[in-house]
């Protein structure tokens, strides 16, 4: 609960501050604050739109893409790879920097399987969103950043768009449909369904150390 609450607070406040200073400059102060807060929440699968999304800065659109990929928290109806996935990956990175064997938070050690699951889900979401964006951009001749916004919205089951979806060809619309379905099914569910566990045994292959970073 602490991890979810802290991560959610950061994902709401930090983008809202950025949107406040970079967008909505033509609004009165009170409406500008509300618009900034709303815009930091709606990409995480609310799906409602009160702002002119194409008119927002490129940096704001990039932040919204990340928010759409993260989504909500486990146990909710929200899509995305979930707030705990992001938190576990960040905590794992901190543990590496501190030369700790395990990721730690609030005086507790995070199970290694949770770190592996978080990495698998994050890789799956980023691959789906990035490959889908590249294919749509190539097929339609549109800017990659615009197509990535659409694919992030689809895989995160958000519903936001920059307005290009109705003009896309059949192939591109099919890609968005598939991304929405895969994003709704969920990361681990999709991975477990695709990988058979019939050949699982207690035997282990020889250990090999690979240099990374």
Image: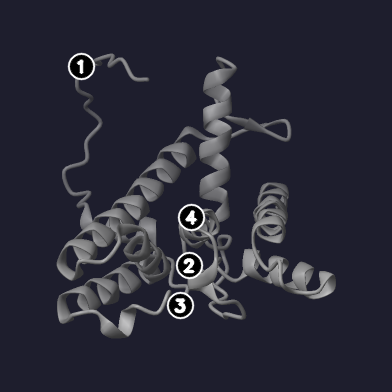
Identity of the residue drawn at 34% across and 78% down: 164
133 vs 4, nearest the viewer: 133
Q: Quadrant of residue 117?
A: top left
Q: Closer to us: mark 1 or mark 2?
A: 2
Disc sitting over residue 159 in the figure: 3
C-alpha distance separating marks 1 and 4: 42 Å
Left or right? Give the position of 6 relative to 45: right
Q: Which residue is mark 2?
A: 79
Q: Which residue is mark 1?
A: 206
State yes or no: discs 3 and 2 in contact (Cβ < 8 Å).
no
C-alpha distance separating marks 1 and 2: 38 Å
Disc sitting over residue 62 in the figure: 4
From what the image shows, is residue 108 above or below residue 7? Answer: above
Q: Which color scheme is applied?
A: one colour
Identity of the residue drawn at 50% across and 60% down: 61
From what the image shows, is residue 121 above or below residue 184? Answer: above
């Amino acid at each position: 609960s602490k991890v979810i609450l802290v991560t959610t607070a950061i994902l709401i406040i930090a983008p809202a501050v950025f949107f406040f200073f970079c967008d909505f400059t033509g609004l009165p102060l009170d409406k500008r604050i509300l618009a900034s807060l709303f815009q930091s929440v709606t990409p995480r699968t609310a799906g409602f739109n009160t702002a002119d999304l194409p008119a927002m800065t490129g940096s704001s659109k990039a932040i919204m893409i990340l928010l759409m990929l993260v989504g909500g928290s486990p146990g909710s109806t929200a899509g995305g790879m979930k707030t705990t996935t992001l938190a576990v990956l960040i905590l794992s990175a901190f543990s590496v920097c501190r030369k700790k064997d395990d990721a730690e938070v609030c005086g507790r050690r995070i199970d290694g399987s949770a770190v592996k699951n978080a990495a698998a889900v994050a890789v799956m979401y980023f691959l789906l969103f990035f490959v889908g964006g590249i294919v749509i951009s190539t097929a339609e001749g549109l800017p990659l950043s615009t197509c990535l916004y659409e694919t992030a919205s689809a895989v995160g089951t958000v519903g936001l768009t920059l307005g290009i979806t109705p003009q896309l060809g059949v192939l591109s619309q099919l890609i968005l449909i598939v991304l929405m379905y895969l994003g709704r099914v969920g990361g681990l569910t999709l991975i477990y369904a695709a990988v058979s566990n019939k050949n699982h045994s207690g035997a282990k292959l020889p250990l090999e150390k690979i240099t990374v970073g």
